Image (tube, rainbow, N blue to C red):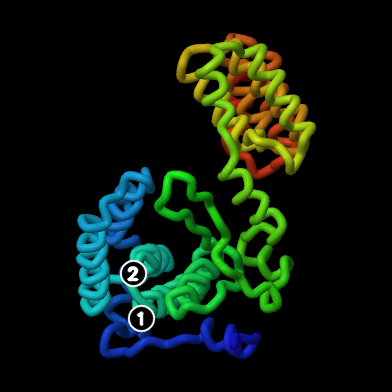
Amino acid sequence: MNTFNKTNLKNIHKIKISRVLIILVLPLSTLAQVSDNVEIKKMVDADQNERTNIDSIDWNILAPRDSIRRYNVLKLMNLNQIVTGKDYYRSALIFQHGKDSNDYRIALDFMRKAIELDSSINKWLLAAIIDRELMSRKQPQIYGTQYFKGNSDTAKWELYKIDTTIISDKEREFYDIEPLAMIRERIREKNLLLITEYFKKTNSIKATIELIKHEKKKGIKSEYNVSEFELNSFGYELVNLNKLDHALKIFKLNTKFYPKAANTYDSLGECLLLLSKKRKGINAYKKALQLNPNNKNAEKIINEQK
């Protein structure tokens, strides 16, 4: 029987680990450190780079490396060299790739301290660690950040079991997590066929565009992934193949399918500039900036092209 409730969640957010391992109340001598710890950043970079292609990971090699990184983080902690919000955030990143509940609880403590020191830090990781800690105890996750794929060739991506009664979509939004319905849709999309594979077989942009339009009309019954992200990725694949005219057609189509997505116009603008269509490119970037006023890339390019 699952007895997890709001009280349990509150307790998880307040977990404190043994101060024999970590002392979060730092001595005054460490307050002089204002820059982020370079060693922790290097460890995080290594951690992320070794996970670039999840399907080719050799866990017999990676697991010991993860263990060494966790040991080194604790060593730096005991030397009072973890001080800034980013230091704690990066330490949490390393420990959330741990092997058991204790590692996840340490990661939780790191994340709580990171947010305490720097409120601008993305809170998604805190929710993800809570989900992982619950999973490590064979409990349902509550935020919906964790999904998995079996080892067989026919295995599909699935959302790890979730208790939907604990967290609302409004609370998910606070942690920069999509609504649950959208999470389920993202996982459905991950199991769909890829447009790029169809293009490779047909080598026809006309047939590919017709397929995209047909699949988009099918909605949730589509067999191919025609999401904004996937079409954008396909467009850049065409750019990398120096098929700029083909890419332009895909980026334009993406803006028609997803007219409120700033990134579609940002990508369209980039492609237009590559094709020396300056005026149209700037207009696309202006549209991207209108949809997302925080788009510094669009703002920068618009100013550079004046």
Q: Is residue 75 above or below residue 216?
A: below
Per the rendering, the mark at residue 283 is none
Per the rendering, the mark at residue 102 is 1
Q: Is residue 62 above or below residue 119?
A: above
* Viewer-side residue, 197 vs 61: 197
Where disc 2 sits, the SS reads: loop
In the rendered structure, the answer to whether residue 186 lies left or right of residue 156 reads right
x%, y% of residue 8? 58, 88
Residue sitting at x 42%, y 87%: 16
Dot 2 amino acid type: Gly
Q: Quadrant of the N terminus?
A: bottom right
Per the image, the residue denoted by label 2 is 98
Q: Quadrant of the C terminus?
A: top right
Residue sitting at x 63%, y 48%: 188
Q: Tell me whether the residue at label 2 lies in contact with that at label 1, contact meaning CB atoms closer than 8 angstroms.
A: yes
In the rendered structure, the answer to whether residue 102 lies left or right of residue 167 reads left
Dot 1 amino acid type: Asn
x%, y% of residue 135? 48, 73
Residue 106 falls in image quadrant: bottom left
Residue sitting at x 64%, y 10%: 277
Q: Is residue 282 above or below residue 169?
A: above
Residue 287 falls in image quadrant: top right
Q: Is residue 286 visible?
A: no
* Viewer-side residue, 279 vs 47: 47
